[in-house]
Amino acid sequence: MLRLNGIVLPLDFDSALLARKAAAMLKVRPSDVKSMRLAKLSIDSRRKPDIRYVAAVEVELPAGAERRARSHGFAAAESAKHLCGIARKIAPPRQFLRPVVVGSGPAGLFCALTLAYSGFKPIVVERGDRVDERLAKVKTYAGGGELDPESNVQFGEGGAGTFSDGKLATGISDSLISTVLQEFADMGGGEELTIDAKPHIGTDRLVSVVANIRRKIEELGGEVRFRTRFVGFETSGGELRSVRLESGGASYSVDTRVCVLAIGHSARDTFEMLDGKLLLEPKPFAVGVRIEHLQTDIDLAQYGRRRGSLPPADYKLSCKTDDGRGCFTFCMCPGGYVVAAASEQGGVVTNGMSESRRDGVNANSALLVGVRADDFGRDALAGMRFQREIERKAYLAGKGQRAVAMTVGALLGNGSASLGAVRPTYPRGVELCDLRDILPPFVTDGIKSALPIFGSKLKGFDRPDAVMTGVESRSSSPLRILRDDKFDSSVKGLMPCGEGAGYAGGITSSAVDGIKVGLAAAAALGGTSSR
């Protein structure tokens, strides 16, 4: 089959029109097209309000016609490599100690799935609950109930990404991206994930997808231990010998030669336990707020018209602040909600999510300013303490229940401090206050300088009644667990992985890193080529 890119289509296109355009591009008759598959679909809104789709297709032609097309520069289509095919290049030895994977976010799940496909029957350790029970805990906290520090938006099966819209677009370039998307599609996410230029699952569908991945790991001989914490490890000669786990108040050891640390960016107690035992270093991250607008206003700004049959519009904005920092939007949730994302008592943390339909009234996005290592100190845990301090300030200002919020007009001095048309969606309610009392001056100054710039790029972004809710402090890990080119930390066999370890930034990049570490772990366990 041949791959054709850049086919421009009207919004009401059908398969017949697509086939005619593909045939014309190939200079063949439509009847010569034996089969055709839509491979990618994106929206071109550069000439708003004249919106178009841009498609890529895979086309099958008779042998002679395909040879002629290839001679004119058309390339063969490359199908996604399924994870089972990648993993089964390694066959385990007859006897081995089972690998342990700590964490069941996208990095941990894809690492464990890779190991399971390779025949290594991993033990997955998850401090929180299985995803359905976790969902109930999240709803209880959102409704004003008590926080479960072990099972919340940050901790539990699926990781923090489960409650973030399930966005699968990524800024990395890697051949494994198509493998990750295909795996998500096969696990119940829907084949559209492999087609959409900006794929997303939606929190409502991601819950079942995550459970299906876990079931596949178990079907292949793996095991998932919930409400179980990783609390330590033993070494000999610089190599891993066992890990210590804790469940139900009792601790026990598991002998293993490989333990993957896919612990997530909020595993602060684990970071504290690892400090001094592994090589850690501080890394830059970003903090700020969630900013909300009416979704209809974002649609109008992006499409130049009412949305109609188009999906809810998104955006991605960035600029440099006066002191050279980056200010940018992140994790934009069309038709979404701001969620209560704390994982510690005495702190307020916000995040954003959408369901698959993206049919909420508001759009929201993180609005963040870069934090440098010299802003908080040079030791590995200083960034974590920096995050915790602003979360604590928000908790006190919100009177232990609400998030803190401020209108754009109040920050810019050109509008009311009272709420207007945009009503905040944080489920526990908001306390209107001055965010300059919560966030460091370089953050609020950076946001203040960026808002008019973003308003010039996206009409209405700086409208006075837009609402900023805080704090957004968990955009990425504040540290990195150092690893070598074989994915080992300073202890051989203890392998840092994913976003929490400082090697990814989102669901897809974390899953890609999980696959790579899983393949390295399988090789370290003594696997040999089976092909």
Image (tube, helix red, strand yellow):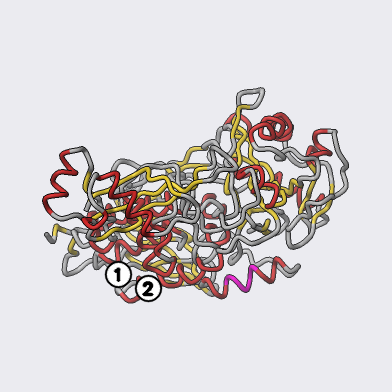
Would you say the residues marked 2 and 1 are in contact, meaning their CB atoms lie under 8 Å apart? yes
Amino acid carrying mark 2 in the image: Glu
301 left or right, relative to 98:
right
Amino acid carrying mark 1 in the image: Lys
Q: Quadrant of residue 218?
A: bottom left
Q: Residue at x 50, y 66 (%)?
A: 206
Rendered image: mark on residue 223: 2
- Predominant SS along the magenta part: helix
Q: Residue at x 76, y 67 (%)?
A: 144
Name the spot of residue 489 as percent of width and height, x first. 36, 46
Seen in the picture, residue 458 relative to 86 is either above or below; the reply is: above
**Residue placed most toward the observer, 305 or 334:** 305
Q: Residue at x 85, y 34 (%)?
A: 414
Name the spot of residue 43 as percent of width and height, x first. 49, 47
Q: Quadrant of the C terminus?
A: bottom left
SS label for mark 2: strand
**Label 1 Cα neighbours within 10 Å, binned few <14 / some 14-19 / many ≥20:** many
SS label for mark 1: loop
462 left or right, relative to 489:
right
Q: Residue at x 37, y 43 (%)?
A: 6
What is the spatial separation of the Cα atoms under label 2 and label 1, in whole angstroms?
Answer: 7 Å
* Residue for badge 1: 121
Tell me, yes or no, whether the highlighted magenta stretch contains residue 426.
no
Q: Which residues are magenta?
A: 134-138
Name the spot of residue 356 as percent of width and height, x first. 55, 63
Q: Is residue 57 visible?
A: yes
Count of labels in the image: 2
Name the spot of residue 49 as percent of width and height, x first. 60, 43
**Label 2 Cα neighbours within 10 Å, binned few <14 / some 14-19 / many ≥20:** some
Q: Is residue 382 visible?
A: no
